Image: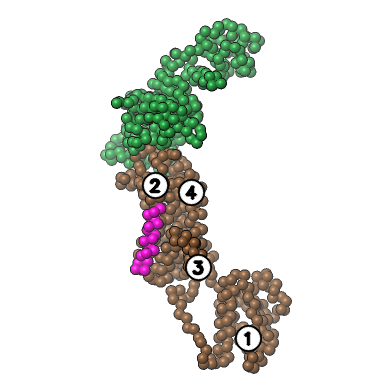
Chain colours: A green, B brown
Amino acid sequence: MMLPIISIKNFSKSFGGTKAVASLDLEVEKGELFGLIGPDGAGKTTTIRTLVTLISPDSGEIFVNNLDVKKDVRKIRSITGYMPQRFSLYPDLSVNQNLVFFANLFDVPKREIAERKKRLFQFSNLEPFAGRLAGQLSGGMKQKLALSCTLIHNPVVLILDEPTTGVDPVSRNEFWTILKELKKEGVTILVSTPYMDEAVKCDRVAIMHEGMVLARGKPETMTASFQNRIYKLAGQDLIKHINSIALIPGILSVQSFGDSLHLTLPDNQAKENIRGKIKNILGRSFQMEPVEPSLEDLFIALIEGKSRNGN
Amino acid sequence: MKLRRIISIIIKEYTHIFRDWRSLLIIILMPVLMIILYGYAITLDMKNLTFAVIDDAKTPESRELIRGFTESRFFILKYTDIKRNEIESLFKKRYIQMALVIPGDFSESLVSNRITKVQLIVDAADSNVGTFINNYSNRVAQLFNEKLNNRSPGILGLEPRILFNPDMKSANFFVPGLVALILLLICSLLTSITITREKETGTLEQILVSPVNPMEIVVGKVIPYITLGFFNGIIIIIFARLLFKVPINGSLALIAVLSLIYIFVALSFGLMISSVAKTQQIAMLATLMATVLPTIMLSGFIFPVASMPLPLQYISKAVPATYFLIIIRGIMLKGIGLAELWQHAAALSGIGMLMLSMAIIRFKVTLE
C-alpha cells in the first residue's frame, strides 16, 4: 500500500506524566510544503523529533516515505533532512568545512560534493563566505548554512523545526523564498512555526494546540470556511474597556490588535444590537467594520471554543 | 561502520583542537605545571629536621655524639643551652622535631661499666618523621658505641644493599606515579567534555539524524585525543627526567607502547562519562572525582596496595592506575620488560576495551 510521504496515525507521546501529543493524525503528500502551526508547547517539536527518529512514539503508526520510524531508523535518517529548533553548526569550523563534514557523514559521493556545494551556494549566496568560520556569520547566514548542511545529501523530505525563530524579518523572507524554490524542485517540506504570517505561505497547515490538531487544510479555505464574523473596532480608549466589552452577551471573543480590537461574533448575531451595547460602555462614537478573518483569528477562535467546551 | 565517516569526525576533532589554541596551550602546560607542583610538594624525604640539644656534660665525648647528628644532611641543630622547661614549648611551636638531653655525668658514665642513658625526645605527630628520627638516632648511637669500644668482636652488623632506588629518593617513587595520575586526569578530562559539549551546543542533535552510528562517533573522537595524550605523556616523562633525575632503566619504546594503552583506557573512561553526562560541568566533576581519588588512594600511588584492607585491595584491581604504576615503576626503576609485565598490560587493555564498549553501548542515538 502506498502511504502519503509522511503518515501519522493515532500518535501519542508523554514525557513523565505530561502528555505532549495525544492521538495525532497527520498526512503530508509528496511535494507539499506543509506547515505545523501552534504556540510553544503545542507538541510541534515532539511530533517532528518523532518523525526524524530522535524520540520514539508511545503509540501510533508513523511512516516517512513508507519507512517505519520504529524499525527503519537508519534508513529514515539517510533520506530526511532535519534542522533542529536550535540549529547549530560547529562555530570553529568554516562554512566550507561544515558542509564537507555533513556531506561525509551522509555518505555523499566524493565527486559530487563540489557540485552540490555550488548548487547550495546558488540559493544561499554564501559562496563569498566559504572560508569564514561559522561562528562569525550573521544570524540569517547561520540559518542558511544550517539549511544547506541539511540539504547536502539531497533529502526526499525536509523537516524544519521553527527555522525562522530569532531571525530578522528580511532573512525570514529570504528563507521562505528558498523553501519555495526547494518545493519547486520536488522536495517535500514539513515546517513548524509559531508565526501565522508564515503559515499562509504553506500549501496546507495543521493548527496544533496542547498536543492535538484543532484544524487542518489549505490556509485560504480554512479562513473562508470560518463560521464566525470578525469585526474590527477602531476608536479611542478601546483597550481600557476590553474586559467589559468581552462580557457583552453574544460576543464570542475580543482580541487586541495594536490599538484596535477584533471582535468575533457568530454568523447569525445581530451586529447592530452589539454596536449599541458597546456604545453604552464607551460613551462615545467608534468605527466597527467587518474584516476578512485571518489564520490568527481562526486560531484564537478554535482555542477559545476548545476551552469553552472543556469547561 | 564506515571509515569515511570516522575519518571525517577525526578531521573535525583535530580542527577543533588546533583552532582553539588557548585550550591547546592549557592541555600542554597543565601537565608540566602539575608535575612541577606535585613533584616538589609530594615528598617523603627527610630533610632539614631541626633539633635542640641540652648538653649538661660539655665534654669531648658529648660533642662527639652531637656531631653524629649535625654531620648528616638530615638534621639541623637549632637550639643549644636552653632550659629544660623550654623544650615543650619549642615542640608545640613546631620549632624542633627532636631534642637531645645529655646528662652531666655522661663521660664518667661511659668509662665506668654502667649503661649510659641519653634522653631523646621525638615529635611523632607525623609518624613517618618520628620513626625516621628514632631509627637514625639508634644508628648514631650504634656508631658511637662501635667507635668507643673499637668494634668488639661478636656484634651483629647488617650490611644492607638497597636495590632499584639506592639513594632512597622518594622522587624516584612518586614521579613515575605522577605520570600515571596526570595522564589519566588530562586524557579523561579531554574526552569527557567532547560529547557533552556537542549536547550543550545542539550539534549532537544534528549529527544524530545522520546515518552515523555510536561506534563511529566514539572511535572518531578517541583517535585524535590519543595523539594529544601521547604527546602529553612524552612531555611529562621528559620533565620527570630533567627536573627530578628519575632514572629510566628500561626500554623507552616499551614505556611508549604501554602508555598508549593506558591513554586509551583514560580516553575511553572519559567518553563513557561523556556519553551519559548531560552537561560539561557534570562531566568534568564526575571525571575528577572518579580519577583523582581512586588513583591517589587506591592504586598504590602513595600507600602500598598490599597493606590495604582486603575489600579495598579488590577495588584497587579495578583502578587502571594500579596496573600502570607497576608497569611504569617497573620499567623506569627496575628496568624490567614485557616478560614480567605482560599480565598488567593485558589487564589494562581489558579495562580499556570494556570501557570503550560501555561508552559505545551507553551512547544514545536518540534524545530520550
SS for callout 4: helix
Looking at the image, the residue that sits furthest to the left is: A111
B22 up-or-down from A160: above or below: below
The Cα–Cα distance between marks 4 and 3, rounded to whole angstroms, is 33 Å
Per the image, the residue denoted by label 4 is B283
Above or below: residue A279 compared with residue A61: above
* Highlighted magenta segment, given as a residue range: B337-355
Which of label 2 and label 1 is nearer to you? 2
Q: Are marks 4 and 3 on the same chain?
A: yes
- Looking at the image, tell me whether mark 3 or mark 1 is earlier in sequence order: 1
> Which mark, by number, is residue B307?
3
Residue type at the position of mark 1: Arg
Task: Say whether disc 2 or disc 3 marks the residue closer to the N-terminus.
Answer: 3
- Is B352 contained in the magenta span? yes
Residue A310, percent across and down? 54, 21
Question: Is residue A253 in view from this perspective?
Answer: yes
Residue that label 2 marks: B361
What's the residue at 47%, 19% (across, down)?
A: A295
* Alpha carbon separation for disc pair 2 and 1: 73 Å
Which residue is drawn at the image coordinates 51% and 92% (left, top)?
Answer: B153
Residue at (40%, 38%) from the top-left corner? Answer: B206
Task: State how far apart marks 4 and 2 are (Cα).
Answer: 18 Å
The mark lying in front, picked from 4 and 3, is 3
Q: Position of residue A40 (x, y in %)?
A: 50, 29
How far is the residue under mark 3 from the one under mark 1? 42 Å
Count of residue discs:
4
Magenta stretch contains residue B346: yes
Q: Amino acid at mark 4?
A: Ala
Chain label for disc 2 = B
- Of residues B35 and B211, the one drawn nearer to the viewer in this rendering: B211
